[in-house]
Image (cartoon, grey):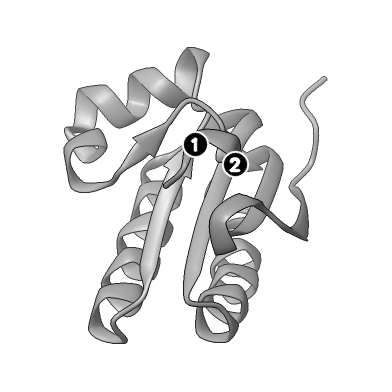
Amino acid sequence: MAKEFMQKESAGPNGWTVWTVSGRIDTMTADQAYAEGERIVQQNAKTILDMSEMEYLSSAGLRVLLRLNKMAKKAGKEFSLSGPSGIVKAVLEDSGMDALFKVYGSPEEAE
């Protein structure tokens, strides 16, 4: 059984705020994910979405990432991704979205 959407926020290396999401970002969880991501991006200069515990990312999830990235850039902030694997990594690569973000292996690798 798939995990439901769960998230946490923590201080990371080099001034990054790490937003860890586990479970799924899909049509059922996209609004919640965007609301949490929006709050975190607005409050921090550098946000990295740790996707290492994420099981699934739908097109609705891709839209969440695009909207957060656009908001961060408009405000002169950074929004990056880390640790995508399995189907999440495949969705990012197949959609070409991985080219729009800095993608790190882990939050510790972020500069």
In the rendered view, does 96 fall on the left or right side of 73?
Answer: left
Question: Which quarter of the picture shows residue 30?
Answer: bottom right
Residue at left 27%, top 46%? 101
Residue at left 44%, top 39%? 58
* Residue 33 sits above or below residue 56 on the image: below
Q: Counting residues from the N terminus, which is met first, the one under dot 2 or under dot 1?
A: 2
* Residue 99 sits above or below residue 88 on the image: below
> Of the numbered discs in the image, which one, if any, rests on residue 50?
2
Please state which of residues 95 and 53 is positioned toward the viewer in this rendering.
Answer: 53
The kind of residue tagged 1 is Ser
Question: Which quarter of the picture shows residue 44?
Answer: bottom right
Residue at left 51%, top 75%? 41
The kind of residue tagged 2 is Asp
User: Quick one: quadrant of the N terminus?
Assistant: top right
Return the x and y of residue 74 as percentages of the image width and height.
Answer: 24, 83
Return the x and y of residue 104 as percentages of the image width and height.
Answer: 42, 33
In the rendered image, which residue does mark 1 sit on? 82
How many C-alpha atoms fall within 10 Å of the one at disc 1: few (<14), some, or many (≥20)?
Answer: many
In the rendered view, does 72 fall on the left or right side of 45?
Answer: left
Question: Disc 2, disc 1: CB below 8 Å?
Answer: yes
The secondary element bearing badge 1 is classed as strand
In the rendered view, does 23 fall on the left or right side of 56?
Answer: right
Residue sticking out furthest to the top? 86
How many C-alpha atoms fall within 10 Å of the one at disc 2: few (<14), some, or many (≥20)?
Answer: many
Return the x and y of residue 49 as percentages of the image width and height.
Answer: 54, 49
The secondary element bearing badge 2 is classed as strand
Residue at left 22%, top 23%? 94
Return the x and y of residue 47 as percentages of the image width and height.
Answer: 51, 62
